[in-house]
Image (cartoon, rainbow, N blue to C red):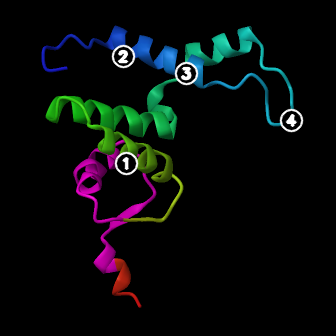
Amino acid sequence: MKLGKVTDEIRNRVTEILLNVSLPNTTPAGLEIGREIKRNYVAQATATTISSLAIETAISEHEWVSQGGADRNTLIDKFHLISALPYVEEIISNDKFFPEIYPVAVKTGHVRAALIGNDQFLNRF
């Protein structure tokens, strides 16, 4: 990232690979999703329109630029944050990682959750 080697072409290819491995083979009702449908979907989908991918991409790019990557604990926290942000009203945590990454995730437009500390939560009672 810092050397400018991550081009739009590379980003698009990574998104294509991520979408391909993420797509199910069948619908919840059991209908098979064929190769052509998958290919057509991947050709028109973008990471910015899929909430989990948009947030994951924003956080990952931020981490690589500012930190040079993420350690194991940060990655585990990131997976929880990514999956929860579009669907919950609040994330309650004193983890140092969340406040650093939260503004980056909010910029995607997919964040519903507010981030509050443990003390803020406990003061409600």
Query: To which residue does mark 2 refer?
Result: 11
Kindly identify which residue carries mark 3.
19
In this view of the protein, which residue sits in the foreground, 2 or 75?
Answer: 75
- CA–CA distance in space, label 3 to label 2: 12 Å
Q: Quadrant of the N terminus?
A: top left
**Which amino acid lies under the numbered mark 2 shown in the image of this protein?**
Arg
- Dot 4 falls on a residue whose secondary structure is loop
Q: Disc 1 and disc 4: Cα gap in Å?
A: 32 Å
How crowded pointer 3 is (Cα within 10 Å; few <14, some 14-19, many 20+) is rated as many
The residue segment tinted magenta is 93-120
Q: Would residue 110 be visible to someone looking at this image?
A: no
Q: Quadrant of residue 10?
A: top left
Magenta-drawn stretch contains 97: yes
Q: Nearer the viewer, mark 2 or mark 1?
A: 1
Identity, as a three-letter code, of the amino acid under mark 4: Ala
**Residue identified by numbered label 1:** 77
